[in-house]
Amino acid sequence: MRDQDTLHCGGAPPVLLASTSVSRRQLLAAAGINFEAVAPDVDEVAAKRELATANGRTLAVALADRKALAVSATRPGAVVVGGDQTLCCGDRLFDKPDGVDAARAQLCALRGRVHELQSAVSVARDGVVAWRHIASARLAMRPFSDDFLERYVTLSGDTLTTSVGAYRLEGPGAQLFERVDGDYFTILGLPLLPLLDWLRQTGVLRQ
């Protein structure tokens, strides 16, 4: 790609996304970021077991750090972006559902209640975290009917298992809610605007 065809600064280091998340890939691509997605070698189950007493905010930051650092260790000089998101409702932390039945049960648990999303982003270079940011959003799920729930689950299928909330706000999942307080990008799992600002300030993107 020619220099005049990109929003990146000439000679800027490569940008890597340490994530397999479809939403995060789509957000970076839509923002005009040239990047390579690399799956981080992080055992999230073991990490969550190790951090079992951490709150949602601390857990999201720790996992974002670990993902960015894991990829950074293998790609010297690159700007590596890691992200993670947690969901808390009351005193319970939710994880991505491991199947459609688990997603249905999770949506039942969230129905008619307010939950909080914590979305963290970390940037690592040469094995060191250079920057991190975390943002919160509060979402009020409406008391939808059982009929609506079954139709929604049937319509969404396996996509329910791709997000911690068992919904995609950019899709039919928007119909689950009566109120949303927070940044749209934060809800999708990546505080994009602070990240873009950091990339501009450090000379990766054009000012």
Image (tube, rainbow, N blue to C red):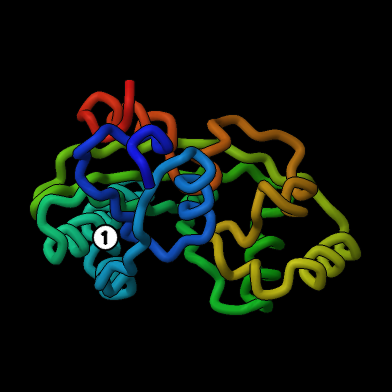
In terms of depth relative to the viewer, which is nearer, 125 or 110? 125
Q: Provide the secondary structure element on which disc 1 rests.
A: helix
Position of 12 relative to 15 (above/below) = above
Q: Do we see residue 26 in this rendering?
A: yes
Which image quadrant: the C terminus? top left
Q: Where is residue 28 in the image (x, y as percent from the top left)?
A: 45, 46
Label 1: few (<14), some or many (≥20) within 10 Å?
A: many
Q: Residue at x 28, y 67 (%)?
A: 40
Which residue corresponds to mark 1? 67
Q: In this view, does 174 lie to the left or right of 67?
A: right
Q: Do we see residue 90 in this rendering?
A: no
**In the rendered structure, which amino acid carries the disc numbered 1?**
Lys
Q: Where is residue 89 in the image (x, y as percent from the top left)?
A: 54, 50
Q: Residue furthest top?
A: 207
Q: Residue at x 49, y 50 (%)?
A: 88
Q: Is residue 168 left or right of residue 192?
A: right
Q: Residue at x 70, y 70 (%)?
A: 104
Q: Residue at x 21, y 39 (%)?
A: 12
Q: Position of residue 150 (x, y in %)?
A: 84, 69
Q: Position of residue 133 (x, y in %)?
A: 31, 36
Count of marks placed on residues: 1
